[in-house]
Image (spheres, grey):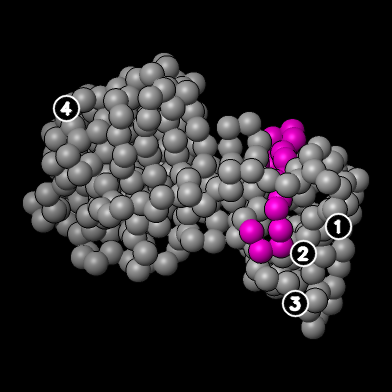
């Protein structure tokens, strides 16, 4: 391929940019154009955008040379090709029908869709952006990841597929629930005004990739019906979810009769092993007497028991026993397994069980045991 009018892009930066933007491309797009990445280029910058009608994610990287152009390139084809072209810069040139890609001794021509067919993206009506040091920005993003483990997978419950994001006084609360489980994390914050919004949980994957990049700060913007995140070369604009998020604080008991201290990583590992011999939806029974926790499950394929140390820290010493869906337990504990310790708060077999570690809280509704 002729080098004239060919832009040069670092292959590693391009691959990462494609990965981030691709998280907003549906695997089953309702329109063929939504299965593409919108590529915009000038002589110094290449921008890639994915859009699924509710969220658009843009990756921006520097480049050298080349013409100004717009193309809508098939996301999977382009991502797969870029993933194979490593070890040296990639050349990109616009052609009359698509793109010409060069890499070392390789030349490829890719047909593209008309960029004019790409739908109008969300109106970026965000006027107020709030800046955070990168560690504070990462704490908020990781708080959203923690909460995302307990969002609903039921498409008919759209509000429960989102993450509650609310600010009251100097505390930012991030929460999610599917009606059976609840995750809450509270973060000290003096930046945001008082807000109460519900954010689409689908952006969490892109947020995690954002904070892996080297940057000094991140920004969060709140606009009419949209929320935005910016960090380094990446930007997310996502529609807010309409509807009233459940009054989740009413689900958390004001006090507990008993408390036990456990190692959450060991408990997570024990339940993971238990689900090897029990179907994921099997009931897992958790019992404790103040010195030992016994985790058990049984079904027609077999049964098993796991024994863990624990410390009894509050109560009358009557012990604890409850049952819960194994998948719910393991997914909920995902957010606590890196903590050194966690406490289990218990009242009775049929009342909410709460796990706490620092500013993180997980509530699980137990299943009634039939003795």
Horizontal side, residue 145 vs residue 97: left or right:
right
Image position, residue 224 (x, y; %): 17, 39
Residue 343 is covered by the magenta coloring: yes
- Whole-angstrom CA distance, mark 2 to mark 3, is 11 Å
- Whole-angstrom CA distance, mark 1 to mark 2, is 8 Å
Query: Circle 2 is placed at which residue position?
Result: 285
User: For the stretch drawn in magenta, what is the main secondary structure?
Assistant: loop
Name the foreground residue: 99 vs 218.
Answer: 218
Residue drawn at x 29%, y 25% as measured from the top left: 193
- Whole-angstrom CA distance, mark 1 to mark 3, is 18 Å
- Whole-angstrom CA distance, mark 4 to mark 3, is 56 Å
Q: Which corner quadrant of the image does residue 126 belong to?
A: top left
Residue drawn at x 71%, y 50% as measured from the top left: 346
Q: Are marks 1 and 2 in contact (CB under 8 Å)?
A: yes
Horizontal side, residue 270 vs residue 30: left or right:
right
Query: Circle 4 is placed at which residue position?
Result: 127
Q: Nearer the viewer, mark 4 or mark 2?
A: 2
Tell which circle, 1 or 2, labels the residue nearer the N-terminal end.
2
- Whole-angstrom CA distance, mark 4 to mark 1, is 54 Å
Tell which circle, 2 or 3, labels the residue nearer the N-terminal end.
2
Q: Quadrant of the N terminus?
A: top left
């Amino acid at each position: 391929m002729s080098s004239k009018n060919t832009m040069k892009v670092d292959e590693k930066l391009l691959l990462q940019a494609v990965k981030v933007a691709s998280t907003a491309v549906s695997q089953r797009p309702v329109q063929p154009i939504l299965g593409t990445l919108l590529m915009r280029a000038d002589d110094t910058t290449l921008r890639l955008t994915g859009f699924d009608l509710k969220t658009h994610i843009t990756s921006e990287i520097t480049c050298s040379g080349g013409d100004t152009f717009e193309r809508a390139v098939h996301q999977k084809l382009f991502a797969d090709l870029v993933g194979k072209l490593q070890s040296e810069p990639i050349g990109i040139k616009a052609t009359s029908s698509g793109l010409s890609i060069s890499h070392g001794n390789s030349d490829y021509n890719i047909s593209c869709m008309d960029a004019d067919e790409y739908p109008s993206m969300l109106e970026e009506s965000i006027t107020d952006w709030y800046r955070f040091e990168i560690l504070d920005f990462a704490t908020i993003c990781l708080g959203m990841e923690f909460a995302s483990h307990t969002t609903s997978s039921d498409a008919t419950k759209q509000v429960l597929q989102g993450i509650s994001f609310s600010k009251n006084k100097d505390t930012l609360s991030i929460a999610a629930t599917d009606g059976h489980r609840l995750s809450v994390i509270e973060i000290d914050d003096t930046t945001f005004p008082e807000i109460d919004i519900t954010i689409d949980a689908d952006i969490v994957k892109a947020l995690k990739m954002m904070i892996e990049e080297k940057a000094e700060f991140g920004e969060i913007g709140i606009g009419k019906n949209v929320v935005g995140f910016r960090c380094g070369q990446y930007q997310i604009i996502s529609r807010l979810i309409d509807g009233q998020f459940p009054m989740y604080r009413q689900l958390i008991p004001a006090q507990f009769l008993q408390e036990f201290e456990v190692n959450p990583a060991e408990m997570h590992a024990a339940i993971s092993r238990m689900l090897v011999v029990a179907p994921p939806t099997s009931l897992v029974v958790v019992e404790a007497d103040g010195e030992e926790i016994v985790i058990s499950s049984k079904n027609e394929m077999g049964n098993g028991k796991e024994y863990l140390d624990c410390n009894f820290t509050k109560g009358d010493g009557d012990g604890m026993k409850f049952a819960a869906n194994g998948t719910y337990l393991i997914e909920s504990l995902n957010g606590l397994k890196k903590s050194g310790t966690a406490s289990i708060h218990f009242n009775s077999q049929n009342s909410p069980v709460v796990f706490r570690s620092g500013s993180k809280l997980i509530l699980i509704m137990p299943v009634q045991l039939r003795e």
